[in-house]
Image (cartoon, rainbow, N blue to C red):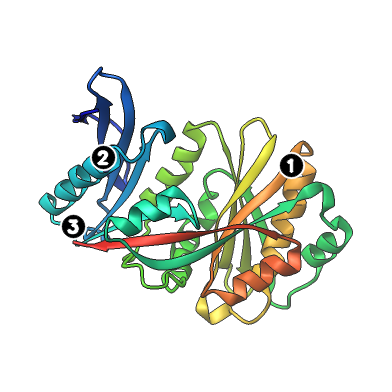
Amino acid sequence: MSVHVTALTDPEETSAGRRLAWLASGSDGRPVGHAFLRLFTGEGRLHLAELDVRVHPAERRRRAGSLLLDAAVAAARKDGRRALIAQADAGSPGAAFLTAGGFRTALTLTYARLPLADADLPALTALAEEPHAGYRLEAWDGMVPEPLADTYVASRRAMDDMPMGAVSYGRVVWDLARVRAAAAAVAARGDLLHTVAAVDRSDGSIAGFTELVVPGDGTGDAQHYGTAVLPEHRGRGLARWMKAASIVRARARHPRLDGLLTDTADNNPYMRRVNDELGYLPTHTAYEYQLDL
């Protein structure tokens, strides 16, 4: 079967990047796979692109994936990108495909889930209510409240030294516009963004934060996004405190939620220990792959 690859117009563009898309179809015109290439446009990430290739299981090993990969690599090079990243679960066909395509393993991620039906709510509540000298907790939905906006933007630098293995991930530069765009993107797809932050009582600045995105109907599994503490406030148990409060809050406000999902780099033992202590159970391993262009 011959395979034809067609470039598509993808209207999705955000403050973080734009996408290119391709469709692979058979000689009969039937779609067999597709690829998306995200070209990051934010300051500090102009060297990077992210790839997602999908081929129908029945159509694999017929060069559709390879042709889609070739098109994406050529486009990334033409745009001046120096690195291409992609993710696949350990042992999956996608992992084998990326390895065969010349990608190297750059980061190992452990995915974990907290089944809320089995969560120790009394223990989590005790952790969330435990005093931390010099700090208080604040929580909000959606966009950060205006009085905390500037200090919240400043706290995003807590993610700058997040362990990323050998991935050339660059540095995400946050400003108020990016914070607003991120909150708006979650709302636009009908989901709910919940944030819990630790505030330094001495000056009212945010010392750390944790984000949770809940499905709009309050069912299924919610997904943890960023959890980070500024370097000068680390070693005080703030991450565990904030995350415990986030769990308790989600359980109370969304009683039909089944579980909470998170992922952690294997070279981030501190956050893995926090998740273990809070009751998260590993579900699977995935790899972040990189192709140097």
Is residue 71 among what the camera can see?
yes
User: Could you tell me if the residues under marks 2 and 1 are in contact, i.e. CB atoms within 8 Å?
Assistant: no
Label 2 CA crowd tier, 10 Å (few <14, some 14–19, many 20+) = some
- Is mark 3 in CB contact (under 8 Å) with mark 1? no
Give the mark toward the camera: 2 or 3. 2
- Residue beneath disc 1: 258
Q: Are marks 2 and 3 in contact (CB under 8 Å)?
A: no
* Residue placed most toward the observer, 230 or 136: 230
* Residue 200 showing in the rendered view: no
Mark closer to the chain start, 3 or 1: 3
| CA–CA distance in space, label 3 to label 1 | 40 Å
Horizontal arrangement in the rendering, residue 233 relative to residue 151 (left or right): right
The tally of labels here is: 3
Q: Residue at x 14, y 48 (%)?
A: 74
The amino acid pointed to by label 3 is Arg
Say what amino acid the circle numbered 1 marks: Asp
For label 1, count other residues whose C-alpha is less than 10 Å away and answer few (under 14), some (14-19) or many (20+). Answer: some
Q: Amino acid at mark 2?
A: Arg
Q: CA distance from mark 2 to mark 3?
A: 24 Å
Q: Which residue is mark 2?
A: 63
- Mark seen at residue 270: none
- Mark 2 or mark 3: which comes first in sequence? 2
Q: Quadrant of the N terminus?
A: top left
Relative to 145, say whether 90 is above or below.
below
Of helix, strand and loop, which one carries label 2? loop
Is 273 on the left or on the right of 49, as rendered? right
Residue 261: image location, x then y, percent: 63, 51
Label 1 secondary element:
strand
Which numbered marker is on residue 81? 3
